[in-house]
């Protein structure tokens, strides 16, 4: 019992000590609060008014900036309004150029035209008639430039190339000694229409004929070219016959029509007596003279002795080989323009098929004569 009493007394003492300690702590807190509270009261008022004073000062410039910004935006909005007004002013400037410029105020120069005589298929050789002619080609497409250069190569015609209308005008300002300008209608910088108007406006260029190059063939398109001062029109892709006819009609230094007709008549008579239709064979080879010459050379090397070989095969009664050889000759003679030889070979092949060589003697001599004559004519062209 004594022990329990001691524990109870000890517990009471501990409780009392705890209470005394709490009271001491509370007193310290109360003593601290009066010293700390005045400081926060003094500090907040000072920063708060500073913040309030600073904020309006900072906001004032901000409001000025924001007020200035809209004014700038308004000025920006007015600028785009100015640009359309410029466009509206420029658009009508181009339209009068299309109608008024055509210097159509000036009549087109008077031209002396030559009637083009009837002719067969035109090839590169025919353009040698215009040797010495100077032609300015205004064309921006590189492939089209090469086509024109290739077409008139070795003809003696001098070509000067301009890549657009502006280049063409610049060239003419330095050198106007041209008879023709082949003018592409659609080009960068200055198109063919405007370039033609500029040319037609200058009397110093009256001796130059402007010929349109265009794939536009509708009546309205052609009328537009004529209004610009393009006196002739050539369709793309360029055709040799059409270009030849334009050159022949307007070029100055070529044979007269009567002389040309006499030449045509003479050649026609001579051609009737020839075994080789050179022009037809050349056309079959895409008007490529080099390629055509190669085929002719191969024919001479391969078939010069064809008559002797046929004789031997008939004697040996090797009719299968006879028909094979005749078949080969048929195909080649058709490609090189040897129509007469082709017709005779066809007739022989049909006859031999029926008689197994009995009628070969009827053709042997004639066949040899025609073959020898054909080989001789081919060698003249090589």
Image: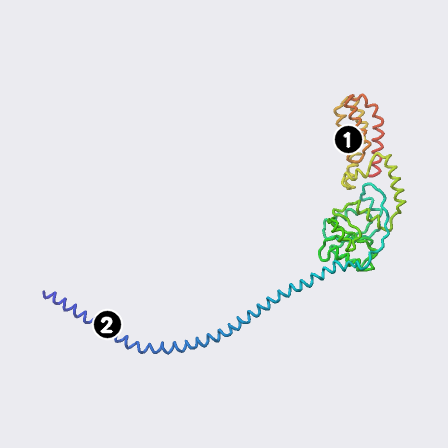
Position of residue 267 relative to residue 226, above or below, is above
Asked if residue 62 is positioned above or below residue 109 in the image, the reply reads below
Horizontal relation, residue 34 to residue 192: left or right: left
Which residue is at 24% across, 74% downward? 24
**Measured from the top left, where is residue 203 in percent x and y?**
83, 59
- Percent x, y of residue 171: 78, 58
- Percent across and percent down for residue 238 are 76, 47
Quadrant where the N terminus is found in the figure = bottom left
Q: Nearer the viewer, residue 270 or 360?
A: 270
Q: Is residue 297 above or below residue 39?
A: above
At 85% from the left and 35% from the top, the residue drawn is: 274
Query: Relative to 64, does residue 205 appear above or below in the rendering?
Result: above
Q: Residue at x 87, y 50 (%)?
A: 253
Q: Quadrant of the C terminus?
A: top right
Q: Could you tell which of marks 1 and 2 lies nearer the N-terminus?
A: 2
5 relative position to 290: left or right = left
Local crowd size for mark 2, using a 10 Å CA cut-off: few (<14), some (14–19), many (≥20): few
Q: Nearer the viewer, residue 5 or 135?
A: 135
Q: Secondary structure at mark 2?
A: helix
Q: Is residue 70 shown left or right of residue 367?
A: left
Q: At 21% from the left edge and 71% from the top edge, which residue is drawn?
A: 19
Q: Which mark is residue 221?
A: none
Residue topped by disc 1: 330
Question: Which SS class for mark 1?
Answer: helix
Display coloring: rainbow
Residue 173 point in image, percent of width and height: 79, 60
Tally of numbered discs: 2
Q: Which of 372 and 23 lies nearest the eye of the viewer?
A: 23
> 23 or 222: which is nearer to us?
222
Residue at the disc numbered 2: 22
| Number of residues whose C-alpha sits closer than 10 Å to that of mark 1, classed few (under 14), some (14–19) or many (20 or more) | many
Q: Quadrant of residue 90?
A: bottom right
């Amino acid at each position: 019992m004594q022990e329990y009493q001691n524990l109870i007394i000890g517990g009471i003492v501990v409780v009392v000590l705890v209470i005394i300690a709490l009271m001491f702590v509370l007193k310290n807190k109360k003593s601290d609060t009066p010293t700390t509270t005045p400081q926060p009261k003094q500090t907040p008022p000072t920063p708060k008014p500073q913040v309030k004073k600073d904020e309006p000062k900072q906001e004032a410039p901000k409001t000025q900036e924001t007020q200035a910004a809209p004014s700038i935006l308004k000025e920006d909005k007015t600028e785009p309004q100015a640009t359309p007004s410029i466009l509206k002013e420029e658009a009508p400037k181009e339209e009068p150029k299309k109608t008024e410029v055509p210097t159509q105020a000036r009549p087109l120069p008077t031209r002396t035209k030559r009637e083009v005589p009837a002719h067969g298929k035109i090839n590169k050789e025919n353009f040698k008639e215009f040797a010495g002619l100077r032609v300015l080609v205004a064309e921006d497409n590189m492939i089209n430039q090469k086509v024109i250069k290739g077409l008139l190569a070795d003809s003696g015609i001098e070509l000067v190339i301009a890549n657009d209308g502006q280049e063409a005008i610049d060239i003419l300002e330095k050198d106007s000694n041209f008879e023709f300008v082949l003018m592409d209608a659609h080009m960068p910088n200055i198109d063919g229409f405007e370039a033609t108007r500029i040319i037609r406006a200058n009397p110093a260029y009256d001796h130059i004929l402007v010929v349109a190059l265009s794939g536009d063939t509708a009546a309205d398109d052609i009328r537009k070219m004529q209004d610009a001062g393009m006196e002739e029109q050539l369709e793309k892709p360029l055709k040799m016959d059409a270009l030849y006819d334009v050159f022949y009609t307007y070029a100055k230094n070529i044979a007269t029509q009567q002389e040309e007709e006499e030449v045509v008549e003479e050649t026609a008579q001579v051609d009737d007596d020839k075994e080789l239709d050179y022009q037809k064979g050349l056309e079959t080879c895409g008007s490529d003279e080099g390629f055509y010459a190669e085929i002719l050379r191969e024919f001479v090397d391969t078939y010069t002795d064809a008559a002797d070989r046929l004789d031997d095969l008939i004697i040996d009664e090797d009719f299968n080989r006879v028909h094979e050889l005749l078949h080969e000759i048929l195909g080649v003679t058709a490609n090189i323009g040897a129509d007469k030889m082709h017709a005779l070979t066809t007739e022989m092949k049909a006859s031999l098929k029926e008689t197994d060589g009995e009628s070969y003697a009827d053709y042997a001599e004639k066949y040899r004569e025609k073959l020898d004559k054909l080989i001789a004519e081919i060698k003249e062209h090589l």
